[in-house]
């Protein structure tokens, strides 16, 4: 699981800053917690921290995992791929969770697990060729 160090540092800094503000406010108000909000102030800060961690770390990670699953499910023979090891090649066959592809001038065949595929190279799925012709006709009118 990869974490973005900048986001982690930002969340940790925000947490440290909020905790110091809460501690300072609690000590200056004679024991009241979280800037005079009573017993619910601390709970509010904890909820805010949980929300920050969710939106800064966990949600983006889940989005990336979903995109990776969609990529691996949409692979087809003939696609050009890059593995996590850096091998590139053209897919020959796909069986359950294994992909066989050929790489290099010698057409060496390699079989890897689907989870080892990092990206698909080449042009993305393009719009049908009819749409530009239709828009060109509409512009001429």
Image: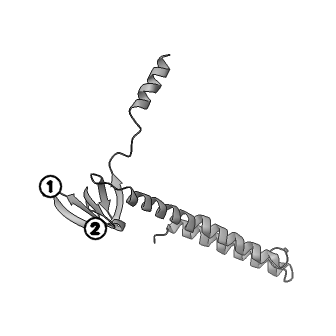
* Residue 127 visible, this orientation: yes
- Determine the residue positioned at 81% across, 81% down: 27
Mark seen at residue 105: 1
In this rendering, position of residue 42 left or right of residue 114:
right
In this rendering, position of residue 56 left or right of residue 108:
right
* Residue 89 visible, this orientation: no
Q: Quadrant of residue 99?
A: bottom left
> Of marks 2 and 1, which one's residue comes earlier in the chain?
1
Q: How far across and down, in percent of the image, does residue 24 sit?
A: 77, 77
Count of numbered marks: 2
| Badge 2: residue crowd in 10 Å (few <14, some 14–19, many ≥20) | some
Nearer the viewer's eye, disc 2 or disc 1? 2
In this rendering, position of residue 85 left or right of residue 46:
left
Residue identifier under label 2: 112
Q: How far across and down, in percent of the image, does residue 140 sit?
A: 47, 17
Q: In front here: 70 or 1?
A: 70
Q: Is residue 59 above or below residue 77?
A: below
- Determine the residue positioned at 24% across, 66% down: 111
In this rendering, position of residue 80 left or right of residue 35:
left
- Determine the residue positioned at 71% across, 76% down: 20
Q: How far across and down, in percent of the image, does residue 45 sit?
A: 73, 73
Label 1 near label 2: C-beta < 8 Å? no
Q: In front here: 65 or 51?
A: 65
Q: How far across and down, in percent of the image, does residue 49 sit?
A: 67, 71
Q: In front here: 105 or 127?
A: 127
Please, which residue is most extreme toward the front here?
Answer: 96
**Secondary element type, mark 2:** strand
Mark seen at residue 84: none
Q: In front here: 75 or 68?
A: 75
- Determine the residue positioned at 29% across, 61% down: 94
Q: How is the image coloured?
A: one colour
């Amino acid at each position: 699981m990869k974490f973005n160090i900048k986001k982690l540092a930002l969340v940790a800094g925000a947490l440290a800053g909020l905790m110091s503000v809460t501690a300072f406010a609690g000590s200056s108000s004679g024991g009241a917690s979280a800037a005079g909000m009573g017993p619910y102030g601390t709970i509010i800060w904890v909820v805010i921290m949980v929300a920050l961690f969710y939106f800064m770390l966990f949600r983006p990670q889940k989005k990336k995992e979903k995109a990776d699953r969609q990529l691996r499910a949409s692979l087809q023979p003939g696609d050009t791929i890059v593995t996590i090891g850096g091998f590139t090649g053209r897919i020959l066959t796909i069986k359950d969770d294994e992909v066989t592809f050929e790489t290099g001038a010698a057409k060496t065949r390699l079989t890897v697990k689907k989870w080892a595929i990092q990206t698909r190279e080449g042009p993305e799925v393009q719009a049908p060729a009819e749409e530009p012709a239709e828009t060109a006709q509409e512009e001429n009118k």
